[in-house]
Image (cartoon, grey):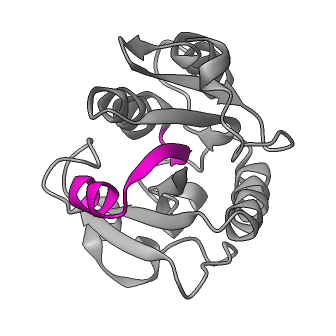
Amino acid sequence: MKQALIIIDAQQELIEGSKEAPPVFEKERLVANINTVIEKANTENAAIVFIRDVDVANGEGPGFDIHKDIKVPPSAVIFNKSATNCFYGTPLDTYLTENNIQHLVMMGCKTEHCIDTAVRTATVRHVDVTLVGDGHSTTDSKTLSAKQIILHHNEALHGHYNVDHFSIVRNTNEALFEPTHNQFR
């Protein structure tokens, strides 16, 4: 089965914060977990795709770049997006189809926006998803802490389905590239 690691909006300014926004919750752990999962993806010969949001740092400069401590493999593919949904207006769907990718491991920022949307959209597009439960982050909202948002989404997205395809949540230390979706079908 062909697989891909999708890392969404793991950009310098979004993770570290800016004058307008604070850093994401547990940013050091997030970056470390992203690097660990990149190593796992390389070991499993999974494709690695980074998605960057052009709204971060106005789409330019070091703030727009992938976080400086993330070890981006030379073989990684990078797509830019201008919407919350990483499938909208990007070549991601075509890339997945052309490469016959049937399972996605997803992580990145921000939990309640781009991560939630990507997981749900992928299942509609006939792909199983493993969300890395300790591999996505956000900031506090007016209503909930970042930790509460993350925990809520891990609960809500574990087992989220669209008939044939669904998402499960597993953590970095688990065998993310050994999908267990068929155990639940």
Relative to 172, does residue 12 appear above or below in the rendering?
A: below
Q: From where the camera sits, is residue 115 visible? A: yes
Identify which residue is drawn at 42% across, 14% down.
161
Give the image location of residue 147, x and y in percent: 68, 24
Relative to 121, does residue 37 appear above or below in the rendering?
A: below
Is residue 155 highlighted in magenta?
no
The furthest residue to the bottom: 74
| Residue 26 appears left or right of 128 | right
Identify which residue is drawn at 47% across, 14% down.
160
Give the image location of residue 162, x and y in percent: 34, 15
Count of marks overlaid on the render: 0
Q: From which residue to which does the magenta span run?
A: 92-110
Give the image location of residue 124, x and y in percent: 28, 27
The furthest residue to the right: 173
Identify which residue is drawn at 53% across, 66% down.
48
| Residue 183 appears left or right of 22 | right
Q: From where the camera sits, is residue 65 visible? A: no
